[in-house]
Amino acid sequence: MSYRLPIHQRLSNALSNDEFRIYYQPVVSLSTNRIVGVEALLRWEQRDPAYASPDTFIGQAEASGFIINLGDYVLRGAAEQMRRWHDRFGPRFKLAVNLSARQFAHHNLTKSIEDALRFARLAGTHLEFEITETVAMHDAEESIGIMRQLKQLGISLALDDFGTGYSSLSYLKKLPIDKLKIDKSFVRDIPSDENDLAIISAIIAMAHSLGMTVHAEGVETKAQADFLRDCGCEYAQGFLYARALPPADFELMVEAAAAGSPELEAS
């Protein structure tokens, strides 16, 4: 691939050349220590380190509009993978997929989702979309309408990176959100940082009062997991359990859990 090409063309060529891979990071129930879901994360296998980071190429794809193509690729590929896992392990996992601002506002969003679910023979109840605060609050009234359409398909909705963007509590109570995801920046220094402890406790209490569950990202130590569980946080993901894994490695992890691995239990 020529690195002199515009980023849109580079991304398009990469998609055509099968350079993208979907990795999966396990989501764990803190009360049972069992894998209950996976988050689909896109990786680009290419040589230029300037664009290898997802933070870089996802941002470029969003700016150029190519995120619509990448989003469809991830949704279809991850839904098909989830069908294979359901056939192999049973319907125990929920698939979480990130929705960018452009995807969320795209006129063809609902049809793309319906097509992906139909092709994979996957029910909407096995799918969760993650939406950032910034996206949800940009035009809250319009966002509520889009979210309600997704909910009609049986899809769960999570508010991602909670606490890091612009938030309005008056609108938060109106959003048809099922889950709040605590950003890893609040998790990193617990249980030693008293301010983060207070913030996390407050987020969990507020979410529960609004009928939402809570999911913590960036969990790296048992002390963090223990504190979150004791505060009532339901779900966690992070390096304590696993990095984002290719499908074959995730399957090995599930099989190890079924065989009685001390780190995780089988569902």
Image (spheres, rainbow, N blue to C red):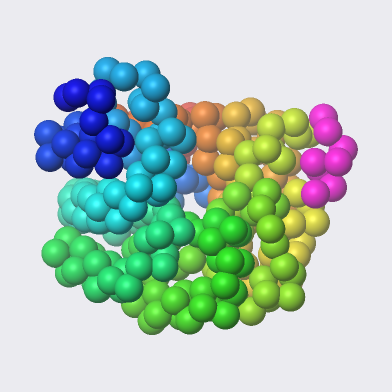
Q: Nearer the viewer, residue 42 or 242?
A: 42
In the drawing, does residue 117 fall left or right of residue 30? left
Percent position of residue 193, x then y? 83, 33
Q: Main secondary structure of the magenta part?
A: helix
Write the start and end of the magenta stretch as one range. Answer: 192-199
**Residue positioned 40% across, 59% down in the render:** 102
* Quadrant assignment, res 154: bottom left
User: Any magenta on residue 226?
Assistant: no
Percent position of residue 44, x then y? 29, 31
In the drawing, does residue 208 fall left or right of residue 176? right
In the drawing, does residue 85 fall left or right of residue 192? left
**Residue positioned 58% across, 66% down in the render:** 138
Q: Can see residue 193?
A: yes
Percent position of residue 262, x then y? 48, 29
Q: Nearer the viewer, residue 72 or 60?
A: 60
**Residue positioned 47% across, 45% down in the render:** 27
